[in-house]
Image (spheres, rainbow, N blue to C red):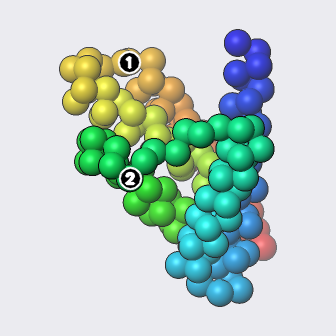
Amino acid sequence: MLFSVLLSTLAGSCIVLQRIVNAKTSAKSSTLAACLYNYIFGLAGAVAVMLLLGRSDFTHAADLKKIPVWMYIGGPLGIVTVGIAAFVAPKISQLVMSLLMFVGQVFASVFIDIIIQGSVNIPNIVGGIFALAGLLLINLDVDKNRERS
């Protein structure tokens, strides 16, 4: 369990670093180019890791027809996420952006749970509300600092 917690924390840190790199790339070229570079180098890295680990998990072209269509939505959603993050990251603080993304994830998860499982998870809703309240407090503090300047 501790190992999973540490890996999740590392993944969260990598997301913030990825946003910063993509934002800088976007500033030097374009948001679309940042997305493209992100996925080209991500694919190259994934292939390299699979080859280094001796994995042969690549799906044969004939098997692609057996994959449900809805499973292909991950790629376009990733492009949208990376594109929005590359565009927004230079405009707001990373803390605020992380909280906004977290709140979006919590409420999207609650909505998906309602659709798929037909249940509402009250602790998740309360957690999302607390995160949203924290975000509002941070923004109030930022606004006060702007007024003083």
- The part of the image, by quadrant, that contains residue 131 is top right
Q: Nearer the viewer, residue 112 or 52?
A: 52
Residue 148 drawn at (x, y percent):
76, 68
Q: Position of residue 31 (x, y in %)?
A: 56, 78
Which tag is nearer the camera, tag 1 or tag 2?
Answer: 2
Seen from the viewer's position, the closer of residues 48 and 25 is: 48
Q: Residue at x 45, y 45 (%)?
A: 59
Q: Residues within 10 Å of mark 2 (few under 14, many from 20)?
A: few
Q: Which residue is mark 2?
A: 61
In terms of secondary structure, where does tag 2 sit? helix
Residue shown at the point (68%, 82%) measured from the top left: 27
Q: Quadrant of the N terminus?
A: top right
On residue 122, the disc is 1
Q: Is residue 90 left or right of residue 136?
A: right
- The answer to whether the residues at label 1 and label 2 have Cβ atoms under 8 Å apart is no
User: What type is the residue that disc 1 sits on?
Assistant: Ile
Q: Is residue 120 left or right of residue 74?
A: left
Q: Nearer the viewer, residue 138 or 83?
A: 83
The C terminus - image quarter: bottom right
* Residue 17 x, y percent position in the rendering: 75, 56
- Where does the image place residue 80, in percent across and percent down from the top left? 45, 63
Q: Is residue 137 left or right of residue 6?
A: left
- What residue is shown at x 51% (from left), y 66% (from top)? 84
Residue type for callout 2 = Ala
Q: Is residue 34 visible?
A: yes
Q: Secondary structure at mark 1?
A: helix
